[in-house]
Amino acid sequence: MTDTASGTPLRGGRIRKPDAAAYAQAAGILRDGGLVVFPTETVYGLGADATDDKAVAAIFEAKGRPRFNPLIVHFADRAAAEEAVVFDERAERLAERLWPGALTLVLPRAAGSAISPLTSAGLDTLAIRVPGHHVTQALIAAGARPIAAPSANRSGAVSPTTAAHVAESLRSRVDMIIDGGPCPIGIESTVVDLTRPEPALLRPGG
Protein backbone atom coordinates (compact mmCIF):
# COMPACT_ATOMS: atom_id res chain seq x y z
CA MET A 1 0.00 0.00 0.00
CA THR A 2 1.19 3.57 -0.58
CA ASP A 3 0.82 6.85 1.26
CA THR A 4 -1.94 8.63 -0.66
CA ALA A 5 -0.12 11.95 -0.42
CA SER A 6 3.25 10.91 -1.84
CA GLY A 7 2.81 7.50 -3.41
CA THR A 8 5.81 6.23 -1.45
CA PRO A 9 5.27 2.70 -0.14
CA LEU A 10 4.69 1.93 3.51
CA ARG A 11 5.29 -1.63 4.65
CA GLY A 12 1.64 -2.40 5.27
CA GLY A 13 -0.33 0.78 5.78
CA ARG A 14 -0.28 4.52 5.22
CA ILE A 15 -0.19 7.91 6.87
CA ARG A 16 -3.53 8.53 8.55
CA LYS A 17 -5.09 11.43 10.39
CA PRO A 18 -6.21 10.51 13.92
CA ASP A 19 -9.84 9.44 13.88
CA ALA A 20 -11.87 6.45 15.05
CA ALA A 21 -11.16 4.44 11.91
CA ALA A 22 -7.42 5.10 12.14
CA TYR A 23 -7.32 4.07 15.79
CA ALA A 24 -9.20 0.86 15.01
CA GLN A 25 -6.80 0.02 12.18
CA ALA A 26 -3.77 0.87 14.33
CA ALA A 27 -5.05 -1.27 17.19
CA GLY A 28 -5.40 -4.21 14.82
CA ILE A 29 -1.85 -3.72 13.57
CA LEU A 30 -0.53 -3.67 17.15
CA ARG A 31 -2.47 -6.80 18.09
CA ASP A 32 -1.00 -8.53 15.01
CA GLY A 33 2.54 -7.65 16.06
CA GLY A 34 3.02 -4.70 13.70
CA LEU A 35 4.57 -1.27 14.14
CA VAL A 36 2.62 1.98 14.42
CA VAL A 37 4.11 5.47 14.58
CA PHE A 38 2.20 8.07 16.60
CA PRO A 39 2.69 11.52 18.13
CA THR A 40 3.28 12.09 21.83
CA GLU A 41 3.70 15.39 23.62
CA THR A 42 7.47 14.90 23.40
CA VAL A 43 8.41 13.33 20.01
CA TYR A 44 6.89 10.80 17.61
CA GLY A 45 7.09 7.24 18.92
CA LEU A 46 7.65 3.93 17.13
CA GLY A 47 5.17 1.68 18.88
CA ALA A 48 4.55 -2.03 19.31
CA ASP A 49 2.60 -4.22 21.71
CA ALA A 50 4.79 -4.17 24.82
CA THR A 51 3.65 -7.69 25.79
CA ASP A 52 4.69 -9.29 22.48
CA ASP A 53 8.35 -10.38 22.25
CA LYS A 54 8.40 -10.51 18.44
CA ALA A 55 6.76 -7.11 18.11
CA VAL A 56 9.23 -5.54 20.53
CA ALA A 57 12.12 -7.15 18.65
CA ALA A 58 10.78 -5.54 15.47
CA ILE A 59 11.25 -2.10 17.04
CA PHE A 60 14.97 -2.74 17.51
CA GLU A 61 15.24 -4.02 13.93
CA ALA A 62 13.37 -1.08 12.40
CA LYS A 63 15.45 1.49 14.26
CA GLY A 64 18.76 -0.32 14.01
CA ARG A 65 18.83 0.05 17.80
CA PRO A 66 21.21 -2.02 19.96
CA ARG A 67 19.40 -4.65 22.02
CA PHE A 68 21.18 -3.44 25.18
CA ASN A 69 19.33 -0.08 25.01
CA PRO A 70 16.02 -0.38 26.95
CA LEU A 71 12.69 0.93 25.65
CA ILE A 72 10.09 3.10 27.35
CA VAL A 73 6.69 1.50 27.88
CA HIS A 74 3.62 3.76 27.71
CA PHE A 75 0.59 3.03 29.90
CA ALA A 76 -2.93 4.43 30.00
CA ASP A 77 -2.66 5.42 33.66
CA ARG A 78 -0.81 4.74 36.89
CA ALA A 79 -3.09 1.86 37.82
CA ALA A 80 -2.13 0.03 34.63
CA ALA A 81 1.56 0.77 35.23
CA GLU A 82 1.37 -0.65 38.75
CA GLU A 83 0.65 -4.07 37.26
CA ALA A 84 4.08 -4.03 35.62
CA VAL A 85 6.39 -2.31 38.11
CA VAL A 86 6.84 -1.77 41.84
CA PHE A 87 6.09 1.78 43.00
CA ASP A 88 7.68 3.25 46.10
CA GLU A 89 6.71 6.45 47.89
CA ARG A 90 8.95 8.59 45.69
CA ALA A 91 7.43 7.17 42.52
CA GLU A 92 3.94 7.71 43.86
CA ARG A 93 4.66 11.37 44.58
CA LEU A 94 6.19 12.01 41.16
CA ALA A 95 3.43 10.19 39.33
CA GLU A 96 0.73 12.06 41.23
CA ARG A 97 2.31 15.40 40.43
CA LEU A 98 3.67 14.94 36.90
CA TRP A 99 1.58 12.26 35.14
CA PRO A 100 0.23 12.25 32.57
CA GLY A 101 3.22 14.03 31.11
CA ALA A 102 6.78 13.99 29.85
CA LEU A 103 8.32 12.08 32.76
CA THR A 104 9.70 8.53 32.50
CA LEU A 105 10.35 6.57 35.68
CA VAL A 106 12.71 3.60 35.90
CA LEU A 107 11.33 1.19 38.51
CA PRO A 108 11.79 -2.46 39.51
CA ARG A 109 9.88 -4.93 37.36
CA ALA A 110 6.96 -6.52 39.21
CA ALA A 111 6.82 -10.28 39.65
CA GLY A 112 4.70 -11.75 36.88
CA SER A 113 4.84 -8.59 34.76
CA ALA A 114 3.36 -9.20 31.30
CA ILE A 115 5.76 -6.74 29.66
CA SER A 116 8.27 -8.32 27.30
CA PRO A 117 11.72 -8.71 28.89
CA LEU A 118 13.19 -7.35 25.65
CA THR A 119 11.98 -3.86 26.63
CA SER A 120 14.34 -4.01 29.63
CA ALA A 121 17.43 -5.15 27.72
CA GLY A 122 18.02 -7.93 30.24
CA LEU A 123 17.65 -5.72 33.31
CA ASP A 124 15.22 -6.30 36.18
CA THR A 125 13.78 -2.80 35.71
CA LEU A 126 11.29 -1.08 33.41
CA ALA A 127 11.20 2.46 32.04
CA ILE A 128 7.58 3.61 32.09
CA ARG A 129 5.46 6.68 31.60
CA VAL A 130 1.85 7.81 31.25
CA PRO A 131 1.72 10.11 28.21
CA GLY A 132 -0.40 13.23 28.14
CA HIS A 133 -1.02 13.42 24.38
CA HIS A 134 -4.61 12.67 23.35
CA VAL A 135 -3.55 10.62 20.31
CA THR A 136 -1.26 8.40 22.38
CA GLN A 137 -3.97 7.86 24.96
CA ALA A 138 -6.55 7.04 22.30
CA LEU A 139 -4.20 4.52 20.70
CA ILE A 140 -3.45 2.80 24.01
CA ALA A 141 -7.18 2.63 24.73
CA ALA A 142 -7.98 1.23 21.28
CA GLY A 143 -5.34 -1.47 21.55
CA ALA A 144 -6.15 -2.22 25.19
CA ARG A 145 -2.49 -2.88 25.99
CA PRO A 146 0.66 -0.94 26.89
CA ILE A 147 2.84 0.26 24.04
CA ALA A 148 6.62 0.05 23.92
CA ALA A 149 7.84 3.07 21.98
CA PRO A 150 11.20 4.75 21.54
CA SER A 151 11.50 7.75 19.22
CA ALA A 152 10.46 6.99 15.64
CA ASN A 153 13.79 7.44 13.88
CA ARG A 154 16.78 5.39 12.85
CA SER A 155 19.16 4.98 15.77
CA GLY A 156 21.49 7.95 16.08
CA ALA A 157 19.29 10.32 14.06
CA VAL A 158 17.44 13.35 15.42
CA SER A 159 14.16 12.45 17.13
CA PRO A 160 11.18 13.34 14.92
CA THR A 161 8.56 15.93 15.87
CA THR A 162 6.35 15.64 12.75
CA ALA A 163 5.01 12.76 10.65
CA ALA A 164 7.03 14.03 7.70
CA HIS A 165 10.24 13.57 9.68
CA VAL A 166 9.27 9.97 10.39
CA ALA A 167 8.40 9.24 6.78
CA GLU A 168 11.84 10.36 5.65
CA SER A 169 13.63 7.68 7.64
CA LEU A 170 11.23 4.87 8.58
CA ARG A 171 8.51 4.78 5.91
CA SER A 172 9.24 1.29 4.54
CA ARG A 173 9.91 -0.11 8.02
CA VAL A 174 6.51 0.58 9.64
CA ASP A 175 2.93 -0.43 9.03
CA MET A 176 1.17 2.86 9.77
CA ILE A 177 1.90 6.47 10.71
CA ILE A 178 -0.69 8.50 12.60
CA ASP A 179 -0.18 12.16 11.73
CA GLY A 180 -1.26 14.20 14.74
CA GLY A 181 0.64 17.33 13.80
CA PRO A 182 3.79 18.71 15.43
CA CYS A 183 4.66 17.48 18.92
CA PRO A 184 3.99 20.22 21.51
CA ILE A 185 7.22 19.82 23.51
CA GLY A 186 9.56 18.58 20.82
CA ILE A 187 12.21 16.90 22.99
CA GLU A 188 12.28 13.51 24.71
CA SER A 189 10.86 12.85 28.16
CA THR A 190 12.86 13.35 31.32
CA VAL A 191 14.07 9.99 32.69
CA VAL A 192 14.52 9.45 36.43
CA ASP A 193 15.92 6.22 37.89
CA LEU A 194 14.25 5.30 41.19
CA THR A 195 15.83 1.86 41.59
CA ARG A 196 18.61 3.18 43.83
CA PRO A 197 18.64 4.90 47.24
CA GLU A 198 19.20 8.32 45.66
CA PRO A 199 17.14 9.20 42.57
CA ALA A 200 19.28 9.63 39.45
CA LEU A 201 18.50 11.85 36.47
CA LEU A 202 19.35 9.68 33.46
CA ARG A 203 18.09 12.13 30.84
CA PRO A 204 16.96 15.74 31.13
CA GLY A 205 14.02 16.39 28.84
CA GLY A 206 10.47 17.60 28.47
Image (tube, rainbow, N blue to C red):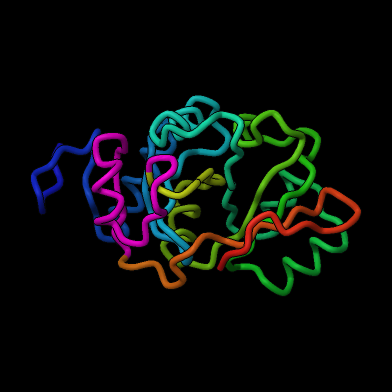
Q: In the image shown, does 5 or 187 lie closer to the viewer?
A: 187
Most foreground residue, 76 or 206: 206
Q: Position of residue 98 (x, y in %)?
A: 67, 71
Quadrant for residue 186, please give it. Answer: bottom left
**Residue 34 covered by magenta stretch:** no
Residue 32 visible somewhere in the drawing: no
- The residue at 80%/69% (across/down) is 93
Task: Locate the N terminus by quadrant.
Answer: top left
Q: Quadrant of the C terminus?
A: bottom right
x, y percentage for residue 108? 79, 43
Percent x, y of residue 179: 29, 59
Outermost residue to the top: 54
Residue 122 at what x, y percent from top left? 69, 28
- Whether residue 155 can be seen here: yes
On screen, residue 202 versus residue 100, left or right, reads: right
Stretch in magenta = 154-180
- Residue 82 shown left or right of residue 77 in the figure: right
Q: Quadrant of residue 199?
A: bottom right
The residue that appears at 38% across and 41% down in the rendered structure is 154
Please state if 195 lies on the left or on the right of 191 as rendered: right
The residue at 53%/67% (across/down) is: 132
Q: Residue at x 52, y 47 (%)?
A: 144
Q: Residue furthest right?
A: 197
Task: Find out whether residue 155 is within the magenta segment.
Answer: yes
Up/down of 104 relative to 95, above or below: above
Tally of numbered tags: 0
